[in-house]
Amino acid sequence: MNWRYFYIASVVILSYVLFLSWNAEKEIKQEVAEATAIDFNKNQQVLPAGETEDFIEIQNNKLIVKISPVTGKIWEARLKEHTYLNNNNSLGVRLFGFDDSKGFKFYLNSGFASEDQSFEVVNVQPSSVELVSVDGKINKNIALKENDYELLIKDVWVGGLPIDLPTPYIAMYRTDGKALDARDNFFENSSYTGVAFNTPDEPYANSRLRSIDERIEYFQRGGWVAFIQKYFMAAILTPPDRVQALIAIPPASGSDTYVMGALSREVKASELMSGVDHRIFLGPKIRSDLMSRASDLELTIDMGWFWFLAQPLMMLLSMINAFVGNWGVSILLLTVLVKLLLWPISAKGFSSMAKMRTVQPKLKEIQESYKDDRTKIGTEMMAIYKKEGINPAGGCFPLFLQLPVFVAFFFCLRESVELRHESFFFWIQDLSAPDPFFILPVVFAALMYLTQQLNPQPPGMDPMQAQILKFMPVMIAVVFVIMPAGLVLYSVANSAISLVQQRAMYKKYGASDFPAGG
C-alpha cells in the first residue's frame, strides 16, 4: 500500500468531517449579561399586525403558550425546562415568537379555509382557553396536555353549514426577516433550518427552508409535517384516519412568509360539527420520546451517514447514563466499551504497524543502497514484507473499518439534546458547548503527538509532507476549540485508549526500541 495516499486520504476525510462540524457549530452561544437581563414581555407590548388585545397565557410543567384572544393564533411557545443559556437567570427557549423590529414572525394558526374570523374569549383555565367567533360560527379550544410537550386544538363548526363544506387546516407561518442573535431566545442556533414530512413512500423527506421555491404537497392518511432545527422542533401530528394534504409553500409574490401545515380532505359535516382535533408537538428532540408520539418522528434527529450505528450508540449511551447519572462519565464508559468491542480489529492494525516499525532500519538501508533504482527498492521492500509476514495495508485497513463508528459517534454526540447544558466535572459545565479553557483540545493534541511518535513513517515520504504531519496535532486542536466538549471528551478518551493499546502491542512485538523513522 502507498502510505502517502493513505495519510492524504485520512487528512481529507478528517478535514471534511471537521468542516461539517464547524458548519453546524459556527453559531456559538453568546454568554453576555444582557442576553439574560432582557424582559421579553416588553416585546409583546408592540403587538403584531391585526392584534388589538394582550395575549392570553396558558401553561403546564413543560410549556408556556401565549394566544391571541382576537385571532386565536399561537404567537409564543416557550419551554420551561430548556433554558437558552446555561444559567438560572436565562429564560426558556422559544419555539414560536416574533420580533417586529427585525421582521421575524413564527406562529401557528388553525381553523377553516376561507373563514377569517375574529374571536371572543369564552373561558380561560390555567392550561386551556376557549374562544368563539364573533359571528358564532366557530368554537376553538386550545389546551396543553398535562406535564407534556403537546398542544391540543379543537376547531368546531357550531353555526349553520354552507353548501360547500369548509376545509379544516392547521399551519405554521415563518417570516425570518433580519438575522437573530443569542438574545432572541429562539430555536438553538444552527446552520440548518428546514421542513420535514413523513409520508408512506418516504418516512423522512426534508428540505432546507430557503431552498423551497415551489409548493410541496403530499396527499395521505396520517403522517406529520415539522419545522426542524438543532435540538428542538415544532411538529404537526396528523391522525391516521383523516385524509390530509401536507404542504410547504414558499413566500408568495411580495411576501417573505413560508407556510408549513396540513389541510384536511373528505371531511363530513358531522365531523365539522363534532370538532376537528389537531396535535402539535413543541419540544426537544429526544429519540425515545419522539418514537412514542408518531411513526418515524425520531428521524428528525440527524444521525448522519451511519445512522444505523449512531442510533444504537445513543440508546446505549442513554442506558449507561441511567445508571451513572453523568453524561460525561457515560461518554467515557461507552468509549471504553466501543474500544473493547473493536479491540480485535485495532489489535491487528497495531500489530502490523509494530512489525512495520521493526523493519524500518532495513527499509532505510534499502532506500539508501538503491536510491537511483525505484524498481529495485520496491522489489527488495516486498521481499522483506514477505519474509517478516507484514501486510503493508494491515495498519490502515482496520482504521478504515473503525471510521464509521467514529463518524456515528460524532453525529450521536453532536445532535443529542440530552447533552445540552449537562455538566461533566470541574470546568466542563456544558457538554454541548466548547471547552471554555481549551484544556481538552490541548490534551488531544498531546495524545495525537505521542501517537505520531509511535507510528512508522511511510517509506519514501516527502520531507514537506512529513513536516505538515507534524503540525497536524496543532491544526486539529485549533478546530476542536469550537467543538462541543462532549465530542472532544470522546476523542481524548478514544485517543488515550488507542495509545495505551498501541504501546502494549509494540512491547509485545519488540518494536518499542525502534525509531518511528523520518
Image (spheres, rainbow, N blue to C red):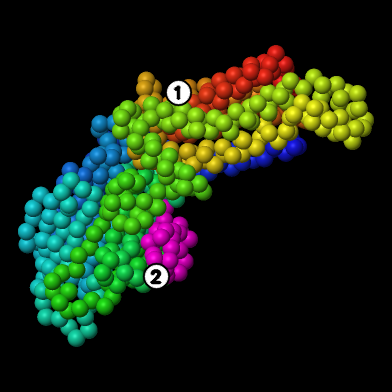
Q: Residue at x 47, y 47 (%)?
A: 308
- The number of numbered badges drawn on the structure is 2
Q: State whether residue 112 is above or below residue 435.
A: below
In reply to whether residue 199 is colored magenta, the answer given is yes
Image location (x, y in percent) of residue 216: 42, 68
Please name the residue that numbered disc 1 is placed on: 437
- Tell me where residue 168 sits by quadrant: bottom left
Q: Residue at x 28, y 51 (%)?
A: 292
**Which part of the image, by quadrant, shows the C terminus?**
top right
Image location (x, y in percent) of residue 116: 22, 72
Q: Earlier along the polypeptide chain: callout 1 or callout 2?
A: 2
The residue tagged with tag 1: helix, strand or loop? loop
The residue tagged with tag 2: helix, strand or loop? strand
Please name the residue that numbered disc 2 is placed on: 217
- Tell me where residue 370 sits by quadrant: top right
Farthest residue toward the top?
Answer: 513
Real-space Cα separation, disc 1 to disc 2, in angstroms: 49 Å
The residues colored magenta run 193-216
Q: What amino acid type is highlighted by mark number 1? A: Phe
In reply to whether residue 336 is colored magenta, the answer given is no
